[in-house]
């Protein structure tokens, strides 16, 4: 829950509440939202030596291992700054196995890397300050949780072991479940601290099949193919990822429907080039698009009109689709990213010239340049009726340079398709 104030100081504050619905809400993302909720649950220090009874937990969202790497992305409580770099749970008095009831809301950075993690520091709080004590807070344990691994957010419930000393260097790149040599852990490295992570994000799908497909697309666009896959096997991996999209959960499928269809259309018209050869995935893209359209029409049957046209898909076609234009250049590999500048999220195409989000500049590049490019090439609503030499020159240019119009490629795949893929396309031909 969050209170927001408008520019008018006399206006009443607005209370924004995010719902955690018990059932799936099948509506695409129409605006940017990238939030993480951290809920500590319980801690067991019964077997920890020393005095650790009045326990509080400090939570920091870290972009590195240094203390100054704590990012001010935690929403503050009432009468506090809007964002803070650290937050504390309530102190549990005289209890070595406390339960926690606090929830912390984090504004996730648009771009995440392996160095981002949540650092938990456990303190014993002295109720009566002694003369020899400089502070009332004594650290009694540390643990951490990576935020982003293998292209996915690490959401869900986690049981973490607790280290007695501050973590060693380069600890963000491993998990706390790995017992490093020369480190001291409470109760022989058992899972003692339970924390729940839940995200509401229009950037991260939080679905295994969709995340895998987005990550493979990002690898191809960046030209950074892992050795475990290899360029020779990338075509098969992409086709398998497209086939697996049919098994994804209903809610993330509908939530990320515009991005998924944009990616598939882009691969259909601009197949990637690996080892000097075009990847032959156009037919797989065409069949996957038809199957996704069929599944969405079935999931949202109440939104179909008398002709079977789905309103969500109609909105995508009319307002959201980003079709490849012949004047644009196909995405080319950009090489590995600098370690201090991680690549954009896998759900955001790296070749797009403008932002998918008008509310977060981190996700886009130069909107003015894109608008300038549109006006430079002109707006022509009669393109489909051209019959002169200019139109013929355009077609010649497209064929000679490998550029294709979207409708031409769709028509080609419709002609060459067969079997179940053709039947699916015909059933959803509207």
Image: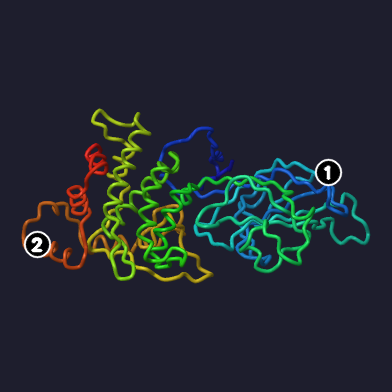
Q: Disc 1 marks which residue?
A: 95
In the foreground, 281 or 27 = 281
Disc 2 + disc 1, Cβ < 8 Å? no
Residue farthest toward the right in the current orientation of the protein: 131
Rendered location of residue 363, percent (x, y): 44, 58
Q: Give residue 16's mark.
A: none
Q: Quadrant of the C terminus?
A: top left
Q: Residue at 30%, 60% (x, y): give it.
A: 371
Q: Quadrant of the N terminus?
A: top right
In the foreground, 22 or 383 = 22
Quadrant of residue 97 in the image?
Answer: top right
Rendered location of residue 61, percent (x, y): 63, 57
On screen, 57 above or below 251?
A: below
On screen, 256 above or below 175?
A: above
Q: Is residue 38 left or right of residue 286?
A: right
Q: Is residue 55 left or right of residue 224?
A: right
Q: Separation of disc 2 and disc 1 at Cα?
A: 81 Å
Rendered location of residue 62, percent (x, y): 63, 60
Q: Colour scheme in the image?
A: rainbow
Q: Disc 2 marks which residue?
A: 392
């Amino acid at each position: 829950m969050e209170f927001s104030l408008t520019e008018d100081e006399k206006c009443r504050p607005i209370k924004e509440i995010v719902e955690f619905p018990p059932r799936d809400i099948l509506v695409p993302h129409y605006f940017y939202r990238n939030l993480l909720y951290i809920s500590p649950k319980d801690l067991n220090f019964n077997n920890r030596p020393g005095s650790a009874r009045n326990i509080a937990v400090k939570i920091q969202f870290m972009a590195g291992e240094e203390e100054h790497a704590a990012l001010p992305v935690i929403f503050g409580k009432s009468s506090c700054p809007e964002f803070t770099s650290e937050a504390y749970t309530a102190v549990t008095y005289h209890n070595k196995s406390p339960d926690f009831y606090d929830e912390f809301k984090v504004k996730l950075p648009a771009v995440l890397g392996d160095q981002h993690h949540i650092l938990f520091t456990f303190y014993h709080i002295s109720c009566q300050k002694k003369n020899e004590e400089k502070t009332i807070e004594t650290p009694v344990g540390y643990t951490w949780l990576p935020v982003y691994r293998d292209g996915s957010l690490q959401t869900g419930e986690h049981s973490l072991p607790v280290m007695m000393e501050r973590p060693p260097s380069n600890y963000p790149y491993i998990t706390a479940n790995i017992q490093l040599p020369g480190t001291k852990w409470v109760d022989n490295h058992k899972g003692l601290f339970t924390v729940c992570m839940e995200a509401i994000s229009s950037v991260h799908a939080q679905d295994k099949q969709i995340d895998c497909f987005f990550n493979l697309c990002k690898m191809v666009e960046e030209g950074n193919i892992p050795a475990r896959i290899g360029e020779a096997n990338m075509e098969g991996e992409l086709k398998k990822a497209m086939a697996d999209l049919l098994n994804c959960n209903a809610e993330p499928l509908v939530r990320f429907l515009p991005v998924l269809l944009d990616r598939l259309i882009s691969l259909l018209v601009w197949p990637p080039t690996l080892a000097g050869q075009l990847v032959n995935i156009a037919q797989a893209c065409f069949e996957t698009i038809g199957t996704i359209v069929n599944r969405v029409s079935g999931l949202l049957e109440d939104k179909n009109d008398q002709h079977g046209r789905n309103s969500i898909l109609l909105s995508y076609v009319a307002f959201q689709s980003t079709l490849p234009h012949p004047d644009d250049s196909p995405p080319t590999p950009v090489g590995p990213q600098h370690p201090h500048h991680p690549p954009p999220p896998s759900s955001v195409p790296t070749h797009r010239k403008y932002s998918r989000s008008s509310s977060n500049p981190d996700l886009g590049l130069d909107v003015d340049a894109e608008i300038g490019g549109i006006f430079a090439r002109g707006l022509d609503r009669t393109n489909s009726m051209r019959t002169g030499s200019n139109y013929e020159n355009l077609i010649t240019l497209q064929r000679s340079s490998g550029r294709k119009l979207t409708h031409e490629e769709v028509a080609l795949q419709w002609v060459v398709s067969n079997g179940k893929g053709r039947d699916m396309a015909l059933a959803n031909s509207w």
